[in-house]
Image: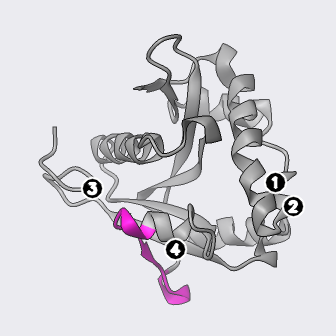
Amino acid sequence: MRIRPAAPAELPALQDVERAAGAPFRDLGMQEIADDDPPALDVLERYQRCGRCWVAADEEDGRPLAYLIAEPVDGALHVEQVSVHPDAARRGMGRTLLAHAAHRAREEGLTALTLTTFADVPWNAPYYARLGFRTLGEDELTPGLRRIRAEESAHGLDHWPRVSMRLELPHGETAFGGPAR
């Protein structure tokens, strides 16, 4: 797998990855999430133009198997979406994309990664906790995270328990341990 910026022509493929990544939510009784539309092409294009849309590409043919989009929010790099195609799951692509985002965040002088996610979905909050993210209390939410949570609530995502999470990016270390490159 190779992590690289998404190319403009690949954005429809990222939508396909998102649709496929949503399908397992059906097994949890979360039909609305499984059927939710992926980010619109203009949204993906905005992240891509800003240099904050990365893909984990297949080594053989270069096609995207996973992607991550992010934006700075209140001194942290907020992971808006990270999705892995189910056919490529359990190969470390999500973790590698998050490590790449953490490296880029540090380069930009940002001190943490943040994200919002479903509390009880095994490949959501419990997965991120294993990677070192911690759940934030309501009193720890920054204004930007409060805005994001309000937008998610308006979109109906609060039908299931959600949490905001944060991973501090200590100076001189990579995310997930080890020295910085």
Residue at figure coordinates x 74%, y 33% from the top left: 15
Furthest residue toward top: 61
- Amino acid found under the numbered disc labelled 1: Ala
Query: Mark 2, residues whose alpha carbon is within 10 Å: few (<14), some, or many (≥20)?
Result: some
| 130 is within the stretch colored magenta | yes
Query: Which residue is tagged 3?
Result: 176
Q: Is residue 144 visible?
A: no
Q: CA distance from mark 4 to mark 3?
A: 23 Å
Q: CA distance from mark 3 to mark 1?
A: 29 Å
Tell me whether circle 1 and circle 2 mark residues in contact (CB < 8 Å).
yes
Image quadrant where residue 112 sits: bottom left
The tag earlier along the polypeptide, 4 or 1, is: 1
Span shown in magenta: 129-140
Query: Which residue is tagged 1?
Result: 34
Q: Quadrant of the C terminus?
A: top left
Query: Which residue is tagged 4?
Result: 142
- Callout 2 secondary element: helix
The tag earlier along the polypeptide, 3 or 1, is: 1
